[in-house]
Amino acid sequence: MDAGLNARFDFSELLALGSDAIASSDALVGLLKVALARGSTAGMATAREEAPVFTGEFAGSIVVRGVQVREMGSSIRLDDLISTSVAHSIVVEEGRAAGARRPPLGPIYRWVQLQVRRGKFDLSWTQRETQQEQIYAAALFVAAWIQRRGIPAKHPMRKGAVAAEIVLHAEVEAAAAELRRRIETP
């Protein structure tokens, strides 16, 4: 599951201020790399904060990859990707409709096991003999509940991309102001 930030900024007016456009452009690219790194970090932090924490696996898997600053004539394109490799990320991001087929038991079984170990899940209601049978019965119950009621969408990756974009735009404005100051100050 990926959430990307794809922004393009036109700095032709700013680059025209400098007598040496190449040096100005290189300085701008350097400042933009810092801005993009800050925006990406803010996006990743927001996505991790917004991620539901049942086991911590999803939030811990969110990373930033593919950060790029590319010059395209007088404009500069900024790309980054907030990404996770967890299999259930699409369900966390987009949710699951009620009435859909039953979710796979494997991840639910592991989640129930973890909850039992933490003391957050009482299995006495299952009326099974072994703990393994109790966990299996509880996992079946949770899967049936999800099938009936669905799972609401959380959108942590989308929220992370929005946060990254907000920070990026503020950082780009600051970078442009810094470059303008450098060009105009002899």
Image (cartoon, rainbow, N blue to C red):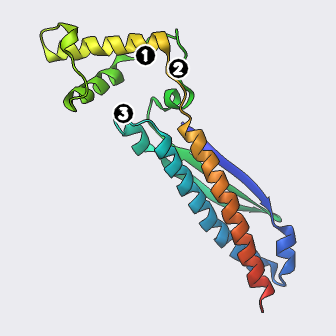
- According to the image, label 3 marks what residue? 54
Above or below residue 142? Residue 51 is below
Tag 1 and tag 2, C-beta contact below 8 Å: yes
User: Is 74 on the left-hand or right-hand side of 30?
Assistant: right
User: Quarter of the image holding residue 185?
Assistant: bottom right
- In the rendered image, residue 109, in percent from the top left (x then y), is placed at 29, 21
The residue carrying pointer 2 sits among few (fewer than 14), some (14 to 19) or many (20 or more) residues within 10 Å by Cα, namely: some
Dot 3: element = loop
Q: Amino acid at mark 3?
A: Phe
Q: Earlier in the sequence, mark 2 or mark 3?
A: 3
The residue carrying pointer 1 sits among few (fewer than 14), some (14 to 19) or many (20 or more) residues within 10 Å by Cα, namely: some
- According to the image, label 1 marks what residue? 103
Foreground residue, 58 or 81?
A: 58
- In the rendered image, residue 181, in percent from the top left (x then y), is placed at 75, 82
Above or below residue 145? Residue 174 is below
User: Is 121 on the left-hand or right-hand side of 185?
Assistant: left
Q: Earlier in the sequence, mark 1 or mark 3?
A: 3
User: Quarter of the image holding residue 26?
Assistant: bottom right
* Real-space CA distance between mark 1 and mark 2, rounded to the nearest whole angstrom: 9 Å
Tag 1 and tag 3, C-beta contact below 8 Å: no
Q: Amino acid at mark 2?
A: Arg
**Residue drawn 33% across and 11% down?**
141
